[in-house]
Amino acid sequence: MKFFQKIKEKIEKKKKKKLEKKLKRQTKHYMLDQYLKKAGISIQSHLLSRGLFKFILFINIILSIYVLFLLASKGGYPLAYIIFIILLIWVFAFFLFLGVVWLGFYIFIDWRIFQRKLSIEEVLPDFLYLTATNIRSGMTIDKALWVAVRPRFGVLAREIETVSKEVMSGKELTDSLQAFADKYESDILKRSINLLIEGIKSGGEIGELLNRIATNIQESRIMRKEMAANVMTYVIFITFAAIVAAPALLALASQLIMIIGNLTSRLDVPATGSMMFSLTEVAVTPGNFKIFSYISLSMTAFFSAIIVATIQKGNVKEGLKYIPIFIAVAISLFIAFSYIMDKVLSGIFV
């Protein structure tokens, strides 16, 4: 009897573990589904996961074929070495690609959600004004919200259409509005919807309330623009230092290294003598310094774009669109300054 009881306990434990794994998997898929809905992507999470896995698998197969072809063309490699390289690709490189792809995907989704939030906040005052006008004309709140929808409202229009459909299917208006507000990490949207919900529950004048909310949002936006204008001097200084001054100084340093290298190579210093110093080859080569310059300029431009966005907009995410521009301009100016200084200084120190 004890033997059978132990077997039953083991079977139950295995069932519990399988159930827990299934619940975890379902929870992960549910969270990813919600994340995709916030980004406005209509695809199921399990199909997305499967597609990304197949894509990484395809890349790994192509990489393995390329490595095998490369090793076979050179020849002379033992079989154990080839097997080790292939295993390294399928163990290390596969999981590295998997992590990089998922990280890039989540960054893209997060950026897309942020852009949708900004688009909602941009048109929210106009939508509230229209809704207030509809309510004053005698419409109910849910109908006023539906009639105020315009194609130019974009993401907000689609979200309000979803709210109206839920209300028509029997869901409470306040619950649908609250779910809409919780969908985005926007303080302006949440505060506006919470005030609207409180007004609906208290039975107040909703039209006047919506007008005041919209006016308050516009006044806050004007105040933020004025604050951004006041710190424009800092923005100009940081931008100039990152994408103009730094490339010019690094280009000058690169040319000086080349000039010093040419001069020391021409000097004929005797091996022995009473000199207190000796001239040797330059430790830093022009090629290595250029690599250092590219890395340094990229990092400086990256952090400068983030600082500029934080000063102007108050949010780091809004600086993501400036990063490639800053890096491209900084590196382009470095190449241009290097070319100009090479033409100017080479004629002097020939």
Image: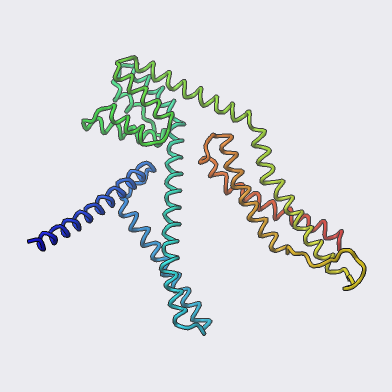
Query: For the point 19% across and 56% down, which residue is it?
Result: 13
**Where's residue 90, x and y in %?**
41, 69
Is 188 above or below relative to 136? below
Query: For the point 29% across and 15% down, which residue is it?
Result: 203
**Where's residue 185, x and y in %?**
41, 35
Question: Which is nearer the eye, 91 or 157?
Answer: 91
Question: Which of the 4 image quadrants contains residue 3?
Answer: bottom left
Is 150 above or below relative to 327? above
Question: Which of the 4 image quadrants contains residue 165?
Answer: top left
Q: Which residue lies furthest to the front in this view?
A: 2
Quadrant, the C terminus: bottom right
242 relative to 16 in the view: left or right = right
Q: Residue furthest left?
A: 1
Q: How many labels does the image show?
A: 0
Q: Residue furthest bottom?
A: 76
Q: Residue furthest right?
A: 274
60 relative to 76 in the view: left or right = left
Query: For the point 36% across and 32% down, which residue is it?
Result: 181
Quadrant, the N terminus: bottom left
Is 328 above or below relative to 314? below
Residue 152 visible within the image? no
Query: For the point 35% across and 20% down, which residue is it?
Result: 134
Question: Which of the 4 image quadrants contains residue 121?
Answer: top left
**Where's residue 171, x and y in %?**
23, 30
Question: Which is nearer the eye, 144 or 241?
Answer: 241
Residue 132 visible within the image? yes
**Where's residue 135, x and y in %?**
33, 19
249 relative to 188 in the view: left or right = right
